[in-house]
Amino acid sequence: MKTLEMTTRTTETSPLLRARVAGVLYLSLVPLSLFGILYSGPSRLGIVSALLVQIVNILVVLALYQLLKPVNKNMAALMVIFLLLGVPIAMLNELNQFAVLLLSSGADSLRVFTPGQVHALVSLFLNLHNDGITIAGIFWGLWLFPMGYLVFKSGFLPRILGILLMIGCVGYLIQSFAALLLPNLNVNIALLTFWGEVLFPLWLVIKGVNVEQWEKRARESA
């Protein structure tokens, strides 16, 4: 009898644990991103922070996959694919920051360049870094759509969170493609559409999921 009770309790707490782990990991991106903004210039601390963000992103999407796959495994897999496509782009993009550090180091090997040429190269790599962020932003947006769809269809999470996440996807895409097609137009629509990425992890940490509905979904997908 005690074994059955312990098994039942474990089953009941498992989706809550998954939800809270995913939520904590997601929220941990906030201080890492803020740290990267504080050291937004080409500094080693800023570069390391940007790389850590991508590592945590991988953990986040894997945790969310475990939580949301009972809704639709194909859409959950698409969510993972979109996020993982953006990770190597963002990480390799930091090579541009390392290039700026090297050019600013005054190394003997750089004396073949005039100060004007060094300045031009620094500007080039900084612009490439910004363009790399824009390209990665396409995938930072795309992964939000299948995630929002899964949340909306789940039955164990509020539908409004799914809608906000899908709106966030549209915001990222508009901002990224506007930056690529109209580089002189400063579009910051993502600042208005990012609320789903704040409220969703907060909900996971504070409220978790509706355990009964999650288990129902898990049985149906088994």
Image (tube, rainbow, N blue to C red):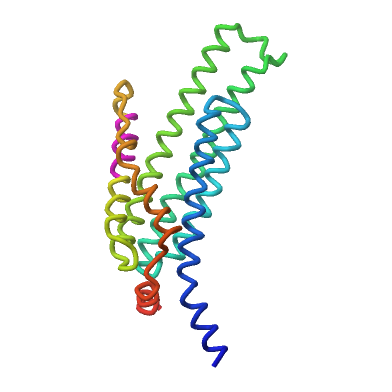
* Quarter of the rendering containing residue 106: top right
Whether 174 is among the magenta residues is yes
User: x, y percentage for residue 117?
Assistant: 56, 10
Q: Position of residue 57 (x, y in %)?
A: 50, 49
- Whether residue 11 appears in magenta in the rendering, the answer is no
Q: Residue furthest right?
A: 108
Residue at image position (49%, 54%) is 60
Q: Which residues are magenta?
A: 170-180
Asked whether 47 or 158 is in front, the reply is: 158
Residue 115 image point, x, y percent: 59, 7
Residue at image location 54% in from the left, 24% down from the top: 41
Q: Main secondary structure of the magenta part?
A: helix
Q: Is residue 43 above or below residue 173?
A: above
Q: Viewed as shown, does residue 207 lie left or right of 2? A: left
Q: Is residue 42 left or right of residue 195?
A: right
Q: Where residue 173 sits: x, y (%)?
A: 31, 40
Which quadrant of the rendered structure holds the N terminus? bottom right
Q: How many marks?
A: 0
Q: Nearer the viewer, residue 170 or 110?
A: 170
**Residue at position x 45%, y 69% from top?**
15
Q: Quadrant of residue 220?
A: bottom left
What residue sits 29% from the left and 64% below the top?
153
**Residue 28 drawn above or below residue 74:** above
